[in-house]
Image (cartoon, grey):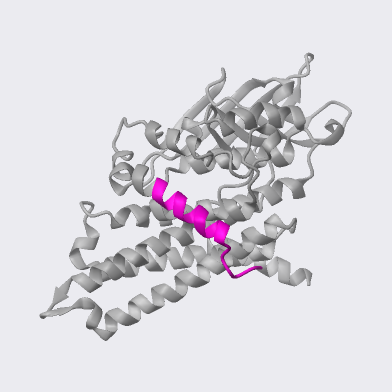
Amino acid sequence: MKLVVTTQERDLAASLRELLTTHCPPELVRSLREPGTDRVPEKLWAALVAAEVLALPFVEEVGGAGGTLDDLAVLYAEAGRALCPTVVLSTLHLGLAVAELGDAEQQARVLGPLCRGELRGAVSLASPYDAADVRPALRAERLGDGSLAVSGRLDHVLDADLADRVLATATLTSYGEPDRLVALLLDPRAAGATLTALPTSDGDRLQQLDLDHVIVPAADVLAGPGGDGLAADRVRRISLLVRALQCVDMAGGAEAVLERTVAHVRGREQFGRPIASFQAAQHLVADIHIAVQGARLAARSAVFWHGRGRPAVRETAIAVVHAATAYRRATLDAHQLHGGMGYVVETDLHLWSERARLLGALGGGPDVAGRWLEEEVGRG
């Protein structure tokens, strides 16, 4: 893994930080939590489309910007710092999955509109409790016209209510043939589909999607080469890539918390002295800094190896352990260093705390990642 940031990455980070500082300030993040508010801010969305952010990791043939996963990691770090609405990242996850699992026609049909900001998406490729568990929650049967009838329940799907399409996997059962693993571009508002909000501390971002004999056209079925089904390992690679990118998001958020905390302890006085002059405060800040830097390196390493074609289970597990732990520690210690004002919702610190809780658990936290690491080490 390269440790030195390139000039191109530095310039990309600077431009993204300027864009998100302008169009995604904490006031916007706070306003999106209000009941009845449209969680897709149109001005921010338009700015991201104009800057080709949604097109960043996709090939030029489908309207993309031809970037790499390393470039995408730069975006996720800045998105985590600014608490960019998760629907932006969920849409990118849909695009990454279709780029990996779809055929040329499906890629052109989905990725073109996605790059232009005309399509929003979400994914449910694995258990919400374990990103490495890609056993399908849905079952599908083929109908006479080639379409599929799909039933089952998807639990804790991030931003499903905002998505035009949700990519999920299903077990395809055909009479006289072995079961196959397929992915489906589901319309969450189709006949037979029901969305139920699952309230969280930072708003109703998670949804339960129940499907009762929902019809999926054959063109929206990703069935692998020759229609023989997808390999579970390919689906798992995408799921773990999403988790690795979320780790970059967490590391970026933790870094933002650290910077806000440093600014606070330098300016806040107690007993006639800045809080930063007290050794106890210095130790807490130093510990946050060490944890954040470890999380950043682990997360970027995981994305780096995903971009080089490695399954990167071990690297992703290490990234989850470091990033989820560092983000949680950073927010908890930051609240302590802010004193009583850090615990009231009139300040902005809780916005990062809530993002830390969401991303730290969704897809499995450090305990789950520890099991991945144990299995990988056991394999030798």
- Per the image, is 332 magenta? no
Q: Can residue 243 be seen?
A: no
Q: Residue at x 14, y 77 (%)?
A: 270
Q: Considering depth in this image, is 337 or 358 the residue closer to the camera?
A: 337
Give the magenta range.
1-19
Left or right of residue 347, residue 180 in this image: right
Left or right of residue 5, residue 223 in this image: right
Q: For residue 148, what is the image quadrant? A: top right
Q: Quadrant of the C terminus?
A: bottom right
Left or right of residue 291, residue 185 in this image: right
Q: Considering depth in this image, is 58 or 235 the residue closer to the camera?
A: 58
Outermost residue, left side: 272
Image: 331 above or below 111:
below
Where's residue 291, x and y in %? 46, 73
Image: 254 above or below 47:
below
Q: Residue at x 29, y 40 (%)?
A: 31
Q: Considering depth in this image, is 87 or 171 the residue closer to the camera?
A: 87
Q: Can residue 81 be seen?
A: yes
Q: Residue at x 28, y 45 (%)?
A: 27
Where's residue 257, x and y in %? 35, 63
Q: Main secondary structure of the magenta part?
A: helix
Left or right of residue 39, residue 140 in this image: right
Where's residue 219, x and y in %? 73, 23
Q: Quadrant of the N terminus?
A: bottom right
Outermost residue, top side: 145
Q: For residue 184, what is the image quadrant? A: top right
Outermost residue, bottom side: 279
Where's residue 143, x and y in %? 76, 17
Q: Residue at x 74, y 22 (%)?
A: 218
